[in-house]
Each structure stands twice: as C-alpha cells, then as structure tokens.
Image (tube, rainbow, N blue to C red):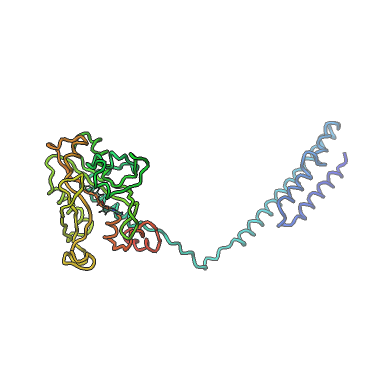
C-alpha cells in the first residue's frame, strides 16, 4: 500500500471541505462525508484490505488510515459548526423584531349580562341557604304540566305552547317542571332549592320575548310556611339585587300550581313609585310570579298538605337583566356583539 495515495485522499478531502462556503447547504457537507467516510469509499476500502497485508505493514497502514479518517472527521465537524452558526446568525438577522412598531389591539370579551345576573341571583339565594338543583330540558307532559296541576285540556296550557317531540314529550316551558323531580327526590322532607335553566316557548321573538330564554325557579317546603315568608324572601332578594330603597308589591294572580298566586312588582328605579314613562305611569314594574304551593301539587308529589306547606316563585333571567341594565332589546343578550358586551366591563 502506498502512503501517497492516502495523503492524496486526505488533501483532496480537506480541500473540498475548506472550499465549502459558510452559507453552503448542509447537504453539500453530508455529500463530502459520504464520499470519504461511507463504507464503500476509497478510504474505507483500503481498511477492508488490511487483512491481506503482512502484520508489520498492516499496523502501519492501519494507523495511517485511522489518522487520515480522524483528520477528515475533525475537519467535517468544524465545518458543520461554522455552517450552523452562519445559518443561525442569518436567521436572527432575518427575524429581527422591530419593537418600535405599534402593537395589535386585541379586544377581549366580557361576561354577558345574562351570566352576571344569573350569578348574582344564585349567590343571593345560596346565602339564604338554598341549594341549586337542575332538571332536564326535554320533559314529559306529566312533569311539565300534570304534576303542576295543569291537566290535559286545561286552558292554562294555552299560555305556554311549546315544542313537542311526541304527544307526551316536549321542551320544558318553565323551570317549574323541576319542582316535581325535586319534591319526589326529597321524599316528603323539607326542601329549599333554586333551579336555573333554559326553557322554551312558541312565543314570537320581540324586544321582550324569545322562544328560548332562561328562568330561575325557587321552591321552599317546610312546616308552617305562609305568604309572609314568601313576601319577606322576595323583598330581601329583590332589595339585594336592585338596591335597599326598592319597594315590592304583590298583586293577586293565577297559576294552576300555586294558591294563592301573585305577580310581584318592584318600585320603578326612575320615579320611585310616583309614575313615569319608564313604568308606564304605574310606579311599579312587574318582575316575577309566585305563590303558595297548591295542596294538589304537594299531594301529587309526596307531601301531606295538612302537615307541609310551601312557596314557589319563578323569574326570567333575561328580563331581570333588561330591567337592571336598561337593555332595550332581549335579543342583544343572545347576539354577543362585542360593542354591547364592552359596556359590562366594570361588572365583570
Ligand atoms: C311561569 O313560567 C311560572 N312557572 C312562574 C311561577 C313559578 C309561578 C312558581 C308561580 C310559582 P310566567 O309564564 O309568567 O310564569 O314566566 C315567568 C317569567 O319568565 C316572566 O315573568 C318573564 O320574566 C319570563 N318570560 C316569560 N316568557 C318569556 C319569553 N318569551 N321571553 C323571555 N322571558 C320570558
């Protein structure tokens, strides 16, 4: 074996490595590496012939080949670092950030007034010792109407036309439907719950009506409960929500599941009961319905009406939001326009 050959290989390899420009693609360096160090390269084929040499020659040639190989490997490593460093510097120059440019102004969302009011109402009742209970939105006719003392063909059904799946299944028309579930689960024991949730009615959408809206039902059952408890509870609730100076007024009304039944009005924030355009001259604004749980409802749901009595009430969350924030159209609550939501930043 001729050492000159090996020197030639080394010189050629070092020159090719050296000639590579700093911005050369890494694949060019890999090509050189394959050319000189791959199994079938000239240098490696010499290694393969070592076995046929006599021992002395084998040792000398072996050392020389390894020496050439190490020098080529070192040169490739050094070049690789140079190419990588160059590429990184190039990247840093190209991706330089001009921090003097104005930033992007992202508009963040704000809590919808619906959720602000729902949370406020829920917290008021939680503080009064009520528990939050939920029920299904797809209900049976039995729970939505019959167990609430609204038998088939009762005219009160007309006020709450709904979306039916079949003659016995519908989207619930009010959260009062949760009453039956809760009472039967309580198994004749005292009960103090609120039930927030979506309800559905075939109402035409306008500024104050939506075909899908949300209610909160309240239900309290215990011994010796009377109208005074209902009035005091609602007064406390409405004053906490709207302010201590607000007066409430109970007007007699009708719901098949409460007897007596009431509509509850709150004194107008604008005129404090004197009468103004906002309250259409009456001084009061209607806010919710309620009453004493009808003995039939107690009986049908497992309570002895001679021992237990209770009150119930139901309110529309969106309507309360409209009143509290002076919103002109219920549909604004559903469309999530950022310009509308932006006004509720402080309440967030
Ligand atoms: C009821 O739904 C009774 N279940 C409430 C009740 C519960 C009475 C327990 C007695 C005892 P009413 O149909 O009035 O009642 O509806 C209650 C509230 O829901 C209304 O005061 C109003 O705020 C709201 N509401 C009714 N219809 C709509 C609608 N289409 N869009 C938005 N809110 C509505």
235 or 84, nearer to the observer? 235
Residue 279 vs residue 23: left or right? Answer: left
User: Can you say whether 236 is above or below 298 in the image?
Assistant: below
Say how many tags the image has. Answer: 0
In the displayed structure, does residue 308 sit left or right of residue 241? left
Residue 248 vs residue 24, the one in the foreground: 248
Q: Say above or below: 337 vs 159.
A: below
Residue 269, given in percent of the width and then of the height, sits at: 21, 64
**Residue 105 placement, left or right of 133:** right
Residue 64 seen anywhere in this rendered image of the structure: no
Q: Is residue 256 above or below residue 336?
A: above
x and y, in percent, of residue 31 in the image: 76, 48
Q: Residue at x 79, y 44 (%)?
A: 36
Residue sitting farthest toward the front: 153
Frontmost residue, 152 versus 60: 152
> Can you tell which quarter of the image residue 172 is in?
top left
Q: Look at the image and tell me in which quarter the N terminus lies.
A: top right
Image location of residue 132, percent across then percent down? 27, 44
Residue drawn at x 16%, y 55% as measured from the top left:
251
What residue is drawn where x is 74% and y is 43%? 70
Foreground residue among 115 and 72: 115
Which quadrant is home to the C terminus? bottom left
Judge whether residue 87 can be spotted in this image: yes
Q: Position of residue 340 (x, y in %)?
A: 37, 62
Q: Would you identify the image quadrant in which residue 62 lies?
A: top right
């Amino acid at each position: 074996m001729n050492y000159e050959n090996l020197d030639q290989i080394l010189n050629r390899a070092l020159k090719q490595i050296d000639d590579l420009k700093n911005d050369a693609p890494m694949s060019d360096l890999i090509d050189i590496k394959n050319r000189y160090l791959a199994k079938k390269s000239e240098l490696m084929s010499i290694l393969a012939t070592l076995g046929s040499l006599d021992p002395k020659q084998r040792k000398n040639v072996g050392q020389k080949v390894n020496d050439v190989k190490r020098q080529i490997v070192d040169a490739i490593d050094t070049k690789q670092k140079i190419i990588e460093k160059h590429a990184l510097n190039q990247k840093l120059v190209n991706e330089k950030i001009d921090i003097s440019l104005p930033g992007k102004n992202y508009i963040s969302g704000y809590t919808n007034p619906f959720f602000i009011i729902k949370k406020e109402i829920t917290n008021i009742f939680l503080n009064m010792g009520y528990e939050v209970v939920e029920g299904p939105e797809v209900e049976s006719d039995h729970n939505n109407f019959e167990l609430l003392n609204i038998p088939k063909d009762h005219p009160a059904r007309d006020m709450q036309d709904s979306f039916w799946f079949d003659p016995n299944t519908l989207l619930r028309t009010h959260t009062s439907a949760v009453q039956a579930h809760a009472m039967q689960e309580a198994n004749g024991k005292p009960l103090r719950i609120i039930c927030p949730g979506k309800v559905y009615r075939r109402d035409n959408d306008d500024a104050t009506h939506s075909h899908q809206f949300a209610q909160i039902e309240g239900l309290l059952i215990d011994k010796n409960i009377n109208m005074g408890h209902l009035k005091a509870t609602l007064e406390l609730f409405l004053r906490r929500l709207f302010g201590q100076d607000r007066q409430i007024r109970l007007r007699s009304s009708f719901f098949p599941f409460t007897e007596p039944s009431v509509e509850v009005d709150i004194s107008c924030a604008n005129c404090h009961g004197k009468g103004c355009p906002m309250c259409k001259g009456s001084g009061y604004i209607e806010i919710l319905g309620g009453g004493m749980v009808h003995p039939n409802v107690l009986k049908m749901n497992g309570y002895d009406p001679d021992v237990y009595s209770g009150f119930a009430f139901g309110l529309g969350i969106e309507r309360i939001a409209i009143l509290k924030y002076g919103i002109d159209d219920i549909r604004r609550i559903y469309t999530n326009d950022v310009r509308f939501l932006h006004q509720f930043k402080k309440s967030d």
